[in-house]
Amino acid sequence: MPRHVHQDAAAGNPTGTIQWNGNGTTYPPGAEGEGQEHMLEGPGSAKDDTLHLKRRLGLFSGVALIVGTMIGSGIFVSPTGVLDRTGSVGLSFVIWIACGVLSLLGALAYAELGTMNTSSGAEYAYFMDAFGPLPAFLFSWVSTLVLKPSQMAIISLSFGQYVVEPFVGDCEPPGMAMKLVAVLIILVILVINCYSVNLATGVQNVFTAAKMVAIFVIICGGMYKLMEGNTQNLRDPFKPISEERVSASVSDIATAFYTGLWAYDGWNNLNYVTEEIKNPSRNLPLSIIIAIPMVTICYVLINVSYLTVMSPDALLESEAVAVTFGNLILGVMAWLIPLSVAISTFGSANGTLFAAGRLCFAASREGHLMNILSYVHIRRLTPAPGLIFHSLIAIIMVTSGSIGSLIDFFSFTAWIFYGGAMLALIVMRKTKKDAPRPYKVPIVVPVVVLVISVYLVIAPIIDQPRLEYLYALLFIISGLVFYLPFVHIGYTSKTMERVTVFLQLLMEVAPTQSVFPAKEN
């Protein structure tokens, strides 16, 4: 895994990493001639630069990436889970608002981290700075194999559900059909992201604008019903919706947060692509400050709209809340809702893969994952191997998982690392006092988010222990089995080196330069 010389696939002799000349042919180091000591970049690169990702994301694209990733399937699936776990309409609104505030505080802390360290990879880069290679490796291990692919799988399954449902009427959508559609959409998004960064960001911008129009339609429909006097479901908001449960337990509140925070997840995705943001010291925090309050307001108003049309019981019985809403209020135009949700989830899945590929790229570049995953296409300058790897794992998850189980597993594991990022910020306030910080948050912000993260991780374990939580912790710890031989000791397999060279030639990709100084493990 640490980047040493590769073996020539044909001769079996050490040659060094294959490089590329201006005609797309390969040459070993030293054979490229005078003035060609570095690998060719795509159009617009500076002469003699090493291969790297280019800065192409401006403020609008940054806002679109955050909003487009956050507003995906969650708000169309999660309202049922939040209401069920809180037991009252009023408390569910408290959870939705609290999730928005928590996401904003976490994102502002990430803005400081992202402007202090402008490397891609988000938590991975911050753990490397604050704690060293082992915690960073464990994060990349879990995120690459579980967190990011499961997030992609959840969104794609939601896309499949909303696309298939209009064709089956009142019947249950066939699971196989939903999974086939989910796999197809993953492949389409993979092609888009591998083909061009500009195409991927353009798709993100267009689909974000389209989903905002759809959300505006839902909110307007709800406000119209509200003006008609349909407020019966909003009166006495803290009255229990079920006589069987008078109040929510500590575990219920934590799992309600999990469900709500799933709808908000994506608030940190811009940090994964920091190396591609124009003027990140300005555009990173500004994108966050614009995007997250916008999403929070939309979510609260959407929930109000749902409850002007559906009773809490009807909302709980609906597996596709937005479609039920459309059937009740839009009449013959109800087909607009499944279409809007499909647009929303497509954009969210596109943004998720865009960010996930950069995490894989950043970790592999430092020798913490397979070398090939850090390589960039020599002309298109996209991290194609990392994107393909994430997509394959997401497809495996789609064929074997359900939305509910994936959401709980994702949320529990993710908040372990979100809390770790807050701790990294606090630690670096002491260990890197003089580091440039173009944007700085009050220290109370990461402290509050850290405390809430600890609560979200520990409360469900104490109140209602489940084997899934143990499996998640064991999976994190199991990364040590791979870290010791492949990263700490530095064992490399000659077979893997030959595979790397073969894949490099097949996909026309080449390595980039490490951004962290070499250090003893």
Image: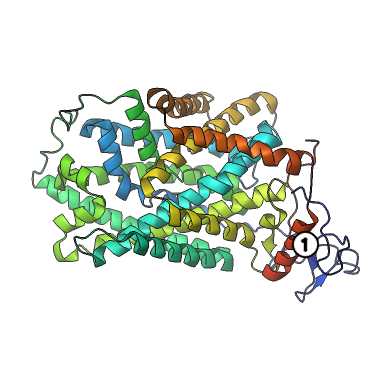
Local packing at callout 1 (Cα closer than 10 Å; few below 14, some 14-19, many 20+) is some
Question: The C terminus lies in which quarter of the figure?
Answer: top right
Judge by depth and name the residue closer to the eye, 12 or 353.
12
Asked whether the viewer can see residue 339, the reply is: no
Q: Quadrant of the rendered structure where residue 330 is?
A: bottom left
What residue is at 58 percent from the left and 59 percent from the top? 387
| Camera-nearest residue between 172 and 69 | 172
Amino acid on which disc 1 is placed: Arg
Give the image location of residue 407, x and y in percent: 41, 43
Horizontal and vertical percent position of residue 463: 38, 23
Q: In this view, does 293 lie above or below 355?
A: above
Residue at (70, 69) in percent of width and height:
508
Residue 196: horizontal and vertical position, in percent? 57, 67
Estimate the x, y position of residue 348 in percent, counting from the top left. Answer: 43, 55
Q: Nearer the viewer, residue 280 or 495?
A: 495
Query: Residue 313: in sight, yes or no?
Result: yes
Left or right relative to 130: residue 30: right
Marker count (numbered) = 1
Colour scheme used in the picture?
Answer: rainbow
* Relative horizontal placement of residue 341, taking residue 223 as reference (left or right): right
| Residue sitting at the far left | 229
Figure check: 192 above or below 472? below
Q: In this view, does 241 lie to the left or right of 506?
A: left
Relative vertical location of residue 336 with respect to residue 22 in this rendering, above or below: above
- 513 lies left or right of 171: right
Q: At numbered mark 1, what does the secondary structure look like: helix, strand or loop?
A: helix
The residue tagged 1 is: 498
